[in-house]
Amino acid sequence: MQKEYLTNLFSLEGKVALVTGAGRGIGQVIARDLARAGADIAIFSRSGAAETVKLIESEGGKAVDIIADCTSEEQVKAGIQKILEVCGRLDIVVNNAGVCYHKDIFEASVEEFRQVIDINLTGEYIVSREAARVMIETKTKGSIINIASMSAYIANVPQRQVAYNASKAGVIHMTKSLAVELVEYGIRVNSISPGYVATPMSIDPDFVEPELLAAWEPLFPMHRMAKPEELTGAVIWLCSDCAAYANGTDILIDGLYTAV
Ligand SMILES: NC(=O)c1ccc[n+]([C@@H]2O[C@H](COP(=O)([O-])OP(=O)(O)OC[C@H]3O[C@@H](n4cnc5c(N)ncnc54)[C@H](O)[C@@H]3O)[C@@H](O)[C@H]2O)c1
């Protein structure tokens, strides 16, 4: 009886969730765990997310892999139409796709600055807008979750990453603003701000030099990075009906990083 109560409270059965950039990293684990909570999954990726689809299907879930670059209005519109054709509805969006360059104000070109803003901020805007259009047309009381970062609150050290930090601060305020604009349609918009999470973005030697990893080590108050799984409970909660009064908010999950 108690078990059923909790399962029903957090169940995403009958819902369809889009997760962007879910070919690997945080997005892959969010997609898997939303499927475990009962949702059918659609993925937007630039080069395919076969591994994620296989993972979800191996556990008995449903997933559809759609090639769509989140910065392209055209591809996002076509991708959302494809979700409607294949899955029949759209209830949840997790705007997860993102990039980070470790370059300071003088190293980064204006083009690189724009690229980061384009993917991390404008991409989330385009996907939110096109998803909200469909949710409004189909009278779906949807939930949009934008992945921001603790870098919205702090400037990470020792690396420099001005474009990333600015983009993530933008995500948090865009989230609040979209929540205000969409509240009358019953669509909630919230964000999650992780600290360092062990994914290719933060541990892959092609992206993070061993010296930088060593410099980060003593800065973790909990002596480690987060695992992607440690974010998914918050995502499932925000998607579920028990978060019906959570709107325009940011959930910081940073293992105390910004507190010390
Ligand atoms: N890893 C961390 O420490 C950390 C911390 C805080 C926030 N985040 C955020 O979490 C999200 C996921 O990061 P991750 O660590 O899993 O990184 P990751 O690099 O492992 O995965 C990001 C995914 O997004 C995809 N992507 C990038 N641009 C895209 C686009 N235009 N269209 C579609 N897909 C695109 C990439 O191909 C990749 O699959 C990002 O928004 C990131 O900024 C990560």
Image (cartoon, rainbow, N blue to C red):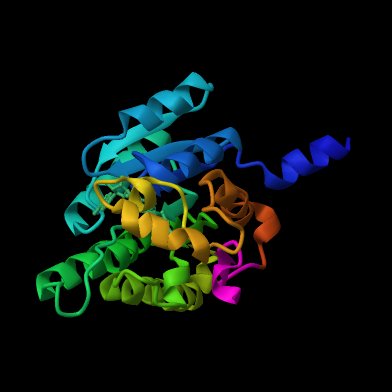
Q: Position of residue 208 (x, y in %)?
A: 30, 53
Q: Quadrant of the C terminus?
A: bottom right
- Residue at 39 percent across and 39 percent down: it is 42
- Residue at 43 percent across and 74 percent down: it is 152
Q: Position of residue 158 (x, y in %)?
A: 35, 71
Where 96 sits versus 258, above or below?
above
Q: Position of residue 258 (x, y in %)?
A: 55, 73
Magenta residue check for 248: yes
Where 245 sits versus 200, above or below?
below
Q: Nearer the viewer, residue 172 or 125?
A: 172
Compared across the picture, whether 22 is left or right of 38 comes to left
Magenta residue check for 210: no
Q: Is residue 137 visible?
A: no
Q: Quadrant of the N terminus?
A: top right
* Extreme-right residue of the structure: 1
Q: Position of residue 228 (x, y in %)?
A: 51, 46
- Looking at the rendered structure, the number of numbered marks drawn on it comes to 0
Q: Nearer the viewer, residue 104 or 229?
A: 104
- Residue at 47 percent across and 69 percent down: it is 150
Q: Quadrant of residue 248?
A: bottom right
Residue bounds of the magenta highlight: 246-260
Q: Quadrant of residue 173?
A: bottom left
Q: Is residue 74 visible?
A: yes
Compared across the picture, whether 185 is left or right of 110 comes to right
Compared across the picture, whether 172 is left or right of 237 comes to left
- Residue at 27 percent across and 45 percent down: it is 79
Q: Quadrant of residue 161?
A: bottom left
